Amino acid sequence: MDEDKILDKEITRLVRSLEKGLPLGLDERIALEASSGAPHRRPFFRKWHLALAVVPGGAALFLALFLLLPAFRKQEEPQITEIRTQFELVDKNITIIFIQSSDFRLFEED
């Protein structure tokens, strides 16, 4: 406890050695807090309890969305790029090949 008092006196001496004066009432507040007993320290988890709750919750929500999003997404139908139709007229030795590509528009005008 003596070391704490020595440290307090050293800090007080350093604070008072600054060029600017101390704000009014600071000495009284320091004395009041020093006389109240134990220092008012908040434990680490008490300060960060909200962050410690939000981070895992956000991670769980992100993981759930990441895993469930493909189930709600509309399945894309495979696009046909080319249709090939072939006819043979054997008695006349003729082969007709019709190829419809993806840029062919039957009912659209240019």
Image: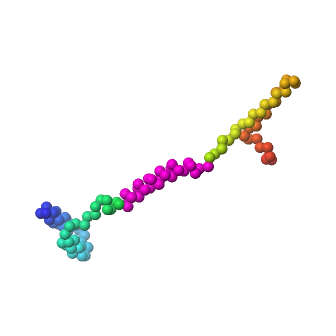
Residue 20 falls within the magenta-colored stretch: no
Return the x and y of residue 92 as percentages of the image width and height. 87, 24
Q: Main secondary structure of the magenta part?
A: helix
Q: Residue at x 35, y 60 (%)?
A: 49
Which residue lies at the image location 80% right of the left edge and 46% below the top edge?
107
User: Residue drawn at (22%, 71%), measured in percent from left and top?
Assistant: 33
Residue 72 coordinates in the image, percent (x, y): 58, 51
Residue 9 higher or lower than 74, as above or below: below
Left or right placement of residue 110 versus residue 75 in this view: right
How many numbered discs sit on the rendered protein? Answer: 0
Horizontally, is 34 left or right of 46 in the view? left
Q: Which residues are magenta?
A: 50-74
In the rendered image, which quarter is residue 44 located in?
bottom left
Above or below, 65 against 32 in this view is above
How does the figure colour the protein chain or chains?
A: rainbow
Residue 36 at least partly seen: yes
